[in-house]
Image (cartoon, rainbow, N blue to C red):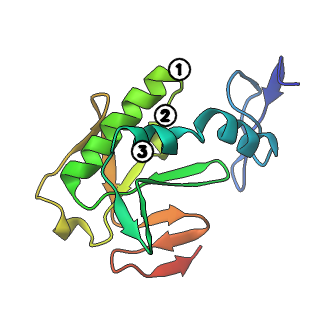
């Protein structure tokens, strides 16, 4: 189905891109994306539980990651625990021969940057992950005071 696909991107108000070959991933909105995610990534939770990864209490459960459709968020109480989880994600993607899209990866701190140690840096395999003041997640924009805005 995806053996020899070509694509074009339309940017409203700016026209269309050149035609290019699509060599990775699935088409936006494809029902295949969540299925592939479940097949290839759903066991990340088991991986994190087996090695006693840092967790956060959410209601009566303890979690390290939130997964929905083809999206994932890792959660931690401290900057140190977050970097541990990022390092564990690097180990997981290497073991499963997967890639993380760092262009879509961000660090969001519910208390804003002021709660992070000044100049705190987070890295995935030596590449810095940007820290943002607001984060878009599951159709909402999350703000540092833990409120959300419609997007």
Q: Residues within 10 Å of mark 2 (few under 14, many from 20)?
A: few
* Residue under the image location 64 percent in, 47 percent down: 70
* Residue under the image location 83 percent in, 17 percent down: 3
Secondary structure under tag 3 reads helix
Give the number of the mark in front: 1 or 3: 3
Q: Residue furthest left?
A: 118
- Name the residue that disc number 3 marks: 49
Residue 139 bears which disc, if any? none
Q: Are marks 2 and 1 in contact (CB under 8 Å)?
A: no
- Name the residue that disc number 2 marks: 100
Q: Give the alpha-carbon distance from disc 3 to disc 2, as whole Å.
A: 20 Å
Name which of mark 3 and mark 2 comes first in the sequence: 3
* Residue under the image location 73 percent in, 29 percent down: 18
- Name the residue that disc number 1 marks: 97
- Residue 30, by quadrant, is top right
| Quarter containing the C terminus | bottom right
Q: From the top left corner, tell me how far across and down residue 80 is, in percent.
A: 19, 49
Secondary structure under tag 2 reads loop
């Amino acid at each position: 189905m995806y053996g020899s696909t070509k694509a074009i991107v339309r940017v409203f108000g700016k026209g269309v891109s050149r035609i290019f070959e699509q060599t990775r991933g699935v088409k936006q909105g494809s029902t295949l994306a969540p299925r592939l995610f479940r097949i290839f990534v759903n066991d990340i939770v088991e991986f994190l539980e087996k090695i006693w990864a840092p967790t956060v209490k959410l209601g009566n459960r303890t979690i390290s990651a939130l997964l929905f459709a083809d999206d994932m968020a890792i959660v931690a109480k401290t900057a140190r625990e977050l970097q541990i989880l990022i390092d564990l994600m690097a180990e997981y993607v290497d073991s499963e021969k997967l890639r993380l899209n760092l262009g879509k990866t961000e660090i969001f701190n519910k208390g804003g940057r002021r709660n992070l140690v000044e100049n705190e840096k987070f890295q995935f395999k030596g590449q810095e992950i940007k820290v943002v003041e607001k984060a878009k997640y599951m159709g909402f924009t999350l703000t540092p005071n833990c409120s959300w805005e419609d997007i």
